[in-house]
Image: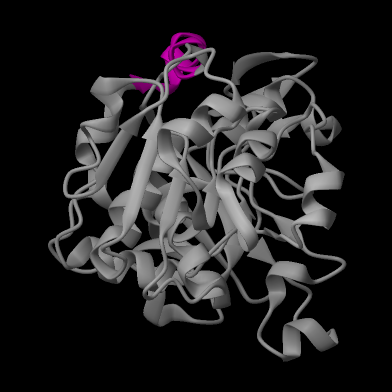
Amino acid sequence: MRSIVFENGASFLSGQGSRPGIGPGEALVRVLLAGVCNTDLELLQGYYGFSGVAGHEFVGLVEECPDAPEWVGRRVSADINCGCGGCALCLAGDPRHCPTRTVLGIVARPGCFAEYFTVPARNLLAVPEGLPDDCAVFAEPLAAALEPGRQVNLSGRRVLVLGDGKLGILTALGLAPDCPDLTLAGRHEAKLALARGARTALLPAGTTPARAREILGLFDVVIEATGREDGLDTALALVRPEGIVVAKTTSRNPSRLDLARLVVDEITLMGSRCGDQSLALERLAGGLDPRPLIEARFSFEEHEQALAAASRSGAMKVLLTP
């Protein structure tokens, strides 16, 4: 079985080993298409002290599932958070925060940069018939993009999505239909143009938080999706007193945060991670088309070129095919 392995800041293609064994309640999934996420690039550089097979954005085909054979032969995505199934959080339906969870391609579970991987059958989500693989592979990142709309009531509020990378654009595309007073702000006109139907604003590189505030004014809710360590400082400058900042950025480097502004202006700071992939698949099947975000495709054999392309400043979505 071929897999892309991360180790000591480098990647290599391994052709050793057979298909992974299937544990109780698990499914064996054959990967059809995988997406490279910024988190994967952070893992390659040592985030979480990671080594092994990364990858958590995929569309695949269930090949074996002894405990739930109805899944065999179906195209699927999957919730990447694999809870223990028995703790209070899991029993309450929230395996995302299970204290002993594994996370596909991130924490203690080999990911989808492989021909095959395993995942609990209870995590599987069916891909709607007729939805192209190129769209279905966005289920996990789109779910994360939609999550702020589940955490905060955005109705009637002035909302800013800060950052025109892949996550920021997906957030704008996903939330704009239900949030007409939404603006996507970023550094690149060409990337902002991908957020069809959303209001956009250009903040050129080097724009200070104070200058961004002069240009844009203040917002009720700021969704920070810059991927940069200074993103929270800018978000705090753009939210009104008693407003809400939703933080999406994860980074191996610490972020800067003006605690004085947070306290004095009584701002609510909320973290936002994974989301509901069933909702994302519904939106994709309903016509949300993320394919303009696809920049390049590579085979597993071309993994070094793929990771280099994904690491380039301003890169859009890079896909991998086994």
Say left or right for 111 vs 214.
right
Q: Give the quadrant of the N terminus.
A: top right
Camera-side residue of 258 and 56: 258
Residue 80 locus on image (x, y percent): 59, 58
Q: Residue at x 28, y 52 (%)?
A: 173
Evaluate whether residue 195 shows in this view. yes
Camera-side residue of 226 and 106: 226
Residue 309 falls within the magenta-colored stretch: yes
The region drawn magenta spans 298-310
Camera-side residue of 201 and 98: 201
Say left or right for 100 vs 193.
right
Residue 306 position by quadrant: top left
Q: Report how many numbered discs are placed on residues in the image.
A: 0
Say left or right for 106 vs 208.
right
Evaluate whether residue 74 shows in this view. no
Residue 247 locus on image (x, y percent): 64, 50
